[in-house]
Structure formats: structure tokens, C-alpha cells
Image: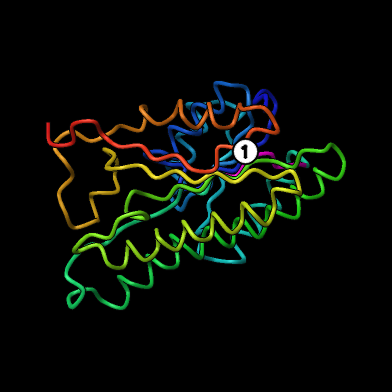
Amino acid sequence: MHLKAKVAVVTGATSGLGLEFSKRLVDRGSVVYGLARRADKLAGIESELGDRFHGLKCDVSDDAQVGRAIATALEGSDRIDILVNNAGLGRFGPVEELTLEDWDVQMNVNLRGVFLCTKAVVPVMKAQNAKSGFGGHIVNISSVAGLVGNPLLSAYNATKFGLKGFSEALMKEVREDGIKVTCFYPGSIQTEFFDTAGVPISAQPLSATDIGPTLVHVLETPDNYLISEVVMRPLRPNG
């Protein structure tokens, strides 16, 4: 896919990977609708990135808010070529110390949010495929915690293992509709994520700028070439 003039929706767009992905896509000439809960941060990013970035205040776990955000994006551009389901959070700790709210917020953002955004975008992409022969590309940001279970990560592991299953099933479901689905499994990344996770980050994590080029590469592959999964880790996480 050539990214110039393509329309992307990126969730969790105000920091970390979401912000980096938005910058990369704007640099390649795409129009980006960035979804996040912090309106002030979105306004600042609009000022920084210019008129190809449109910030939309949205809690991805809220069905009505997701519906309004996707409708706004369609009003502005009449198509959606890329969806990056990046919004996510972790709250780590012993299972007996996790609260119900800790469990629910991770399930709601990390899984329900992906489902709601995907459900809203897939009909649009199917219609695009019917017209042009290619529907679009959905990229889900999971984690190596979606591949390997670890102590203190029980709820987070559950969401990311769930996202792996969702991504694999979705890929097989929509590939004949000209829609690519790719799932990323990054290791520890230096972002705001660890501010609330409850565990320390590794001594030498990845950075968002390390991963940005991988997104661009995956999106720019030929239309009949699908990279369905990408695992990425720090080479020397402990320094």
C-alpha cells in the first residue's frame, strides 16, 4: 500500500507507540485520525503535526464514542484504509491483590476497545474492497505477554493472549475481503505504559522510534503480501 493520501485511524494516539505511529504516517503523506481520551494532548499534537492529523476525543471502550469517532473520520475523508488498534494498559500484581476494577479496565481497553474499533471499520473496508479490490489494513498491538505467561501479569496476559486469538481469527475471516490483519508482539518499550503497570521496566527497553519503521514497512508491502505477525524484543534487555 502506498501511504500517501491514505486515511488512518490510530488509537491511543497521544503518547508512546500511538504518537510515534501517527507521526510516521503523517510524514508518509497519510491523513491520521488520532483517538485518545486526553483532548488537551490531542490539540497539542494537531498543532505539531499540522492539518493531516485530526485529534478525536474517544474512550475506545465506549461503543457510542467509538461510533461517533469513526463517523467523524468518514465525514472528513469518506474512507478508512488503516486501523491501528494501539490503545492499551496494564496493571500488574499478585492475582489476589488485583481489584475487580483492575481486571475490568484491562479487559475493556485491551480487548473490548479493539473489538469495537474493528467492528466499526470492517464494513467500511469491505465496501472499499468491493470497489477497488483492496479493503485496507488492521494492525493490532499486542505484546510478548500475548505469547508467554508471566507471574504478576495474569490479567494483562489474559487480554494479550485474547488479542492474539482475535487477530488470528480476524485475519482468516477477512483476508478474502482484501483486508490485511497484522498483530505486533513487542517486548518492553519505554513509554508511559509502565507509569501505571506496577512493575519496573527492563534496564534497556525498546523505544517507540525503534518500532515506527516496522509499522511503515508492514503497511507498505504489496497488496497480496501479508505479514500476519511480528515479534520484536530488545536484544539486551538487561543492559
Counting from the top left corner in percent of width and height, residue 238 is at 12, 36
In what quadrant of the picture does the C terminus appear? Answer: top left
Identify the residue at horizontal 45%, vertical 35% (top origin).
Answer: 44
Identify the residue at horizontal 18%, vertical 45% (top origin).
Answer: 201
Q: Does the magenta stretch include residue 211?
A: no
The one nearer the camera, 178 or 71, is: 178
Identify the amino acid type marked 1. Answer: Ala
Counting from the top left corner in percent of width and height, residue 231 is at 39, 40
Q: Is residue 81 magenta?
A: yes
Structure colour scheme: rainbow
The one nearer the camera, 140 or 64, is: 140
Identify the residue at horizontal 80%, vertical 43% (top origin).
Answer: 129
Give the magenta range. Answer: 79-83
Q: In this view, does 147 lie to the left or right of 64?
A: left
Identify the residue at horizontal 70%, vertical 26% (top origin).
Answer: 5
Q: In this view, does 219 lie to the left or right of 81?
A: left
Counting from the top left corner in percent of width and height, residue 143 is at 36, 49
Is 166 rendered above or below residue 6? below
User: Dot 1: few (<14), some (14–19), or many (≥20) neighbours within 10 Å?
Assistant: many
* Image-quadrant location for residue 84: top right
Q: Is residue 17 left or right of residue 73?
A: left
Q: Is residue 78 left or right of residue 89?
A: right
In what quadrant of the picture does the N terminus appear? Answer: top right
Secondary structure mostly taken by the magenta-highlighted segment of the chain? loop
Label 1, on which residue? Answer: 8
| Element assignment for label 1 | strand
* Image-quadrant location for residue 211: top left
Is 226 rendered above or below residue 165? above
* Image-quadrant location for residue 208: top left
Counting from the top left corner in percent of width and height, residue 17 is at 40, 38
The one nearer the camera, 65 or 123, is: 123
